[in-house]
Amino acid sequence: MALIVQKYGGSSVADAASIKRVAKRIVDTRRAGHDVVVAVSAMGDTTDELLDLAHEVAPIPAPRELDMLLSSGERISMALLAMAIHSMGFEARSFTGSQAGMITDSHHGKARIVDVTPVRLREALDEGAIVIVAGFQGFNRDTRDITTLGRGGSDTTAVALAAALEADVCEIYSDVDGIFTADPRVVPRARKLEVISSEEMLELAANGAKVLYIRAVEYARRHGVLIHARSTFSSAEGTLVVDEKRRGDLAAAFPQLKGDHMEEPVVAGVATDLSQAKITVVGVPDVPGKAAEIFKIVAKSGANVDMIVQNISAASTGRTDISFTLPKADATGALRALAAEQSEVGFESLVHDDQIGKLSVVGAGMRSNSGVSSTLFEALSEGGINIEMISTSEIRISVVLRGDDLAEAAQTVHTAFGLDGEVDATIYAGTGR
Ligand code: ASP
Ligand code: MG
């Protein structure tokens, strides 16, 4: 008997029929003799609809009230799910985030979990009940207010529950079969992975892969939680996201983890990201301190800078260009802040480009294999695709390209690294959540 945490995303509980299907899945797990704790998201697009509604009554809704409103979405799904389980003859009890002991800091809309005190959940489990917890929400002890964890936060709820309850596995259900070597909507020949290291998953999530939320992966890595990403719409095994250091210990329970993983491909996956923009600060005086000035202004605007490239300065002018990428949503604020300081910094102009795409190849095998960058650049060159920026980490190489080229580039690179599957990946209609 194990303790299993399961998380169901909005698309898995979109309507009454889906809720019943999820209830059956939960009951089957219980029937197999396991204790089950479920974190559930709001039904379908409920959170988006509530957000729209909030903006209809107020241009800038008060953060405290917005969290009150958004947290109600998960209350609906958790209660309905508990009812559906009851009607199948099983005991289930639903809990809000605060009842479940999900303690966060006080940042409305993007609260971080600081402690989990699942006293009531343990009691319910001890009494033989299936436990259902509202995802995405918590409680701050100082303000005594309800908080939410940021979009997609139910993944984090599930992982935090798994850590606090020392669950054997945290199963994250969505409408895709697991973690793929690329987004199957972009690269049809993407292959489902049986196993991926949490380190690689973190890089993929940080670079555009949407299948798991980065905060949840971070939390899992920090607390040694084994994630099993799988689909609500099939009973196939999904993908295990595992800390390499724990792989050996877990192999007894999960046969997928046995065997020689030294044979695995150098590149685990290709991530694509269309959510970034590029700003170029043109004609920056090439003297010490200018980059510091520029990025101080950008940081103060609240923008999260990703890649940075500085050109060699033209000897004749003593000026250079500095380009950087950032989330599209942050670009307007950064441009405004820079423009306000133009004469102070002494640059000539600003160029805003929101038609870029970012492609990243990720693989722990890069540490011990040379030639990954040359394979990548060769593939792009054969595809006639121009590279605008490059950045690397120990286990990742990213390039910025034209957004229009991104899908073709991803397919070409996926093939070049030998990642293509035999057949096209199954895509269940939906959002990937
Ligand atoms: N319902 C929230 C959202 O849509 C949380 C989640 O789905 O994980 O962002
Ligand atoms: Mg949702």
Image (cartoon, helix red, strand yellow):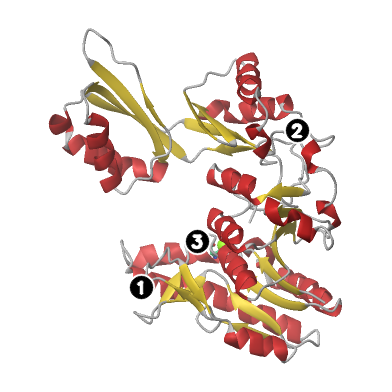
Badge 3: residue crowd in 10 Å (few <14, some 14–19, many ≥20): some
Badge 1: residue crowd in 10 Å (few <14, some 14–19, many ≥20): some
Tell me residue 194's x, y (percent).
78, 49
Q: Quadrant of residue 346?
A: top left
Horizontal side of 331 relative to 408 (left or right) equals: left
Residue at the image position 84 percent from the left and 61 percent from the top:
252
**Label 2 belongs to which residue?**
419
Q: Is residue 424 visible?
A: no
Within 8 Å of ligand 1, the CB of disc 1? Answer: no
Q: Secondary structure at mark 1?
A: helix
Q: Secondary structure at mark 3?
A: helix
Residue at the image position 81 percent from the left and 78 percent from the top:
30
- Type of amino acid under label 3: Asp
Disc 3 and disc 2: Cα gap in Å? 35 Å
Q: Please give the label number shown on residue 302.
A: none
Determine the residue located farthest toward the bottom in the rendered image: 127
**Label 3 belongs to which residue?**
48
Of the numbered discs 3 and 1, the one sitting upstream in the chain is 3
Q: Given this view, does label 3 or label 1 mark the residue nearer the observer?
A: 1
Residue at the image position 71 percent from the left and 48 percent from the top:
196
Tell me residue 335's x, y (percent).
27, 37
Within 8 Å of ligand 1, the CB of disc 3? Answer: yes
Compared to 196, does 373 lie above or below? above
Compared to 96, does 341 lie above or below? above
Q: Given this view, does label 3 or label 2 mark the residue nearer the observer?
A: 2
Q: Quadrant of residue 420?
A: top right
Tell me residue 168's x, y (percent).
73, 69
Residue at the image position 55 percent from the left and 43 percent from the top:
208
**Label 1 belongs to which residue?**
64
The C terminus lies in quadrant:
bottom right
Disc 1 and disc 2: Cα gap in Å? 46 Å
Q: Secondary structure at mark 2?
A: loop
